[in-house]
Image: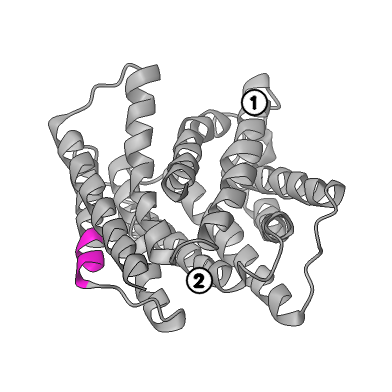
Amino acid sequence: MVPLVAITVMFLWALCYPFISIGLEYSPPLLFAFIRAILAGFALLLLAKLLGRPPIVGKNNWIAIVVIALTATTVGFWGMFYAGGILSPGLATVLTNTQPLIAAVIGWYVLDEKLSKKSIIGLFLGFSGIVVIGLGSMNIHNEELIRGIGYVLFASIGIAVSNIFLKRIAAQVDSLYAMGWQLFLGAFPLAIMSLYLEDYSEFQLTPDLVTSLLVLSLFGTSLAFVLWFWLLTRVPLYQANAYSFLTPILGMLIGFLFYSEVLTLSQILGAVAVIAGIWAVNSTRSRELQSS
């Protein structure tokens, strides 16, 4: 069940990339990110209310929700949307996928999730596969390279920190309310930054923009985040994060199947390395469970 849910989450996140590209043609990035987050958050909060889910209680849980909102939604969306307009897809993909490594290091000390040698090798093998996949589309001559790298690394650190806090409260709060509130609260700093930094004359409310927002908000964000939260209640963070290396691979498959993109040898080899890395991480965990 865990692998199926994990692959579904990564597929939903991979599906986001083409719809983000469509939406950014009609909206400034921060405004687009704000609308995406606020719609997703509102949808989850409404669903939680209709289903009668238990509300979040406790000061510590609310502090965690606010931290997650600022790191996952505000910092994560801000960094990724801005970096997307600066970095080449290959370099952005590689840098984004430093997040599982960052989270594994933090989780080692904060969550006491000790990694075996095979798990460490698996994580680095998966990351190496991402590097191989991204090599073909890297552009290291961009004059804004350092700024773009800063954006995406800042976002990756933010997401890694948010995952640590999510893991800590996963068994204590309702998933719909937790994800709904963090998206809803994290959207407002994006709106404030958008007001000061962006030109709204670029905004065009077209059918394509509405479609991309609905797909991103309901499926790429709301559904994906709730499934991700469920995963964190079932497996260690480093194991769940290992699956995130699949996102660019699934993105390649989407491009191959629906956009007639050609798969290169380096992409295929990188995919093999990623799959081997995920297998290494998960086979280690399986033996740990059997021996416990």
**Which residue is depicted at the point 69% across and 61% down?**
178
Viewer-closest of 114 and 23: 114
Question: How far across and down, in percent of the image, does residue 250 sit?
Answer: 37, 35
Quadrant location of residue 36? top right
Viewer-closest of 78 and 267: 267
**Which residue is depicted at the point 38% across and 43% down?**
247
Chain part drawn in magenta = 117-122
Q: Which residue is mark 2?
A: 164
- Indicate left or right for 272 with 244 as reference: left
SS label for mark 1: helix
Residue 139 can be seen in this image: no
Asked if residue 73 is among those painted magenta in the image, a careful observer would answer: no
Viewer-closest of 228 and 66: 228
Asked if residue 119 is among those painted magenta in the image, a careful observer would answer: yes
Instruction: State whether residue 201 is above or below residue 140.
Output: above
Question: How far across and down, in percent of the image, does residue 229 sit?
Answer: 58, 57
Q: Are marks 1 and 2 in contact (CB under 8 Å)?
A: no
Q: In the rendered view of the protein, which quadrant contains the C terminus? A: bottom left
Q: What amino acid is at disc 1?
A: Thr
Q: Which residue is mark 1?
A: 211
Instruction: State whether residue 57 is above or below residue 87.
Output: below
Q: Residue furthest front?
A: 291
- Indicate left or right for 266 with 161 as reference: left
